[in-house]
Amino acid sequence: MRNQIELRAVSHHFGTGDSQIHLFNDLELTIEGGNSYSIVGPSGVGKSSLLTLTAGLEQPTSGNVRFSINGEDVSQQKLRKRSGFIFQQFH
Ligand SMILES: Nc1ncnc2c1ncn2[C@@H]1O[C@H](COP(=O)(O)OP(=O)(O)OP(=O)(O)O)[C@@H](O)[C@H]1O
Ligand SMILES: [Mg+2]
C-alpha cells in the first residue's frame, strides 16, 4: 500500500500589494504514508497553512498538490472523504 502527498513548486501568498505575506516559494515536499512528521517553526511562519494545503482543504496560490492512495492518484474530494483533520482552533 503506497499513500503519498506530493507538493511540487508550491507557492502560497496572502493579501495584496504592500500587505502581502509570502509563506512559501517553490516548496517541494513529499509525505509518505506510514511515517510521522513534525512541522516546526515560529508562530506565523505558515505551519497551519502548510497543513491545510497538504490536507487539500485549500489550494496553493501556484504549484501542484497531488494525492495518491494505494499508488493511484485521487482527487482532493476523495482524499477528504478518507482523511481526518484536527484544527488548531476547532471552535
Ligand atoms: N486566510 C488567511 N488570510 C490572510 N492571512 C492569513 C490567512 N491564514 C493565515 N494567514 C497568515 O499567514 C501567516 C501564517 O499563518 P499560519 O496560521 O499558517 O502560521 P503558524 O505557523 O501555524 O502559526 P502558529 O504557530 O501561531 O499556529 C500568518 O501571518 C497569518 O496571519
Ligand atoms: Mg498554526
Image (cartoon, rainbow, N blue to C red):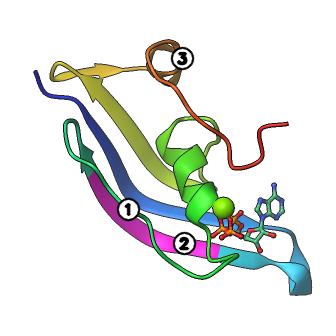
Q: Closer to the camera: disc 1 or disc 3?
A: 1
> Which image quarter: residue 90?
top right
Crowdedness of circle 3 by 10 Å Cα count: few (<14), some, many (20+)? few
Crowdedness of circle 2 by 10 Å Cα count: few (<14), some, many (20+)? some
> Which image quarter: residue 74?
top left
Which amino acid is tagged 1? Ser
44 vs 35, left or right, is right
34 vs 88, left or right, is left
> Which image quarter: residue 86?
top right
- Looking at the rendering, the quadrant in which ligand 1 lies is bottom right
The answer to whether residue 89 is above or below residue 1 is below
What's the mark number on residue 77? 3
Q: Which residue is mark 1?
A: 38
Residue 77, image x, y percentages:
54, 17
CB under 8 Å between discs 1 and 3: no
Q: Earlier in the sequence, mark 2 or mark 1?
A: 2
The answer to whether residue 59 is above or below residue 30 is above
Q: Which residue is mark 2?
A: 24
> Residue at point 69% right, 49% down?
88
Viewer-closest of 18 and 38: 38
Crowdedness of circle 1 by 10 Å Cα count: few (<14), some, many (20+)? few
Task: Measure the alpha-carbon separation of dots 1 and 3.
Answer: 25 Å
The secondary element bearing badge 3 is classed as helix
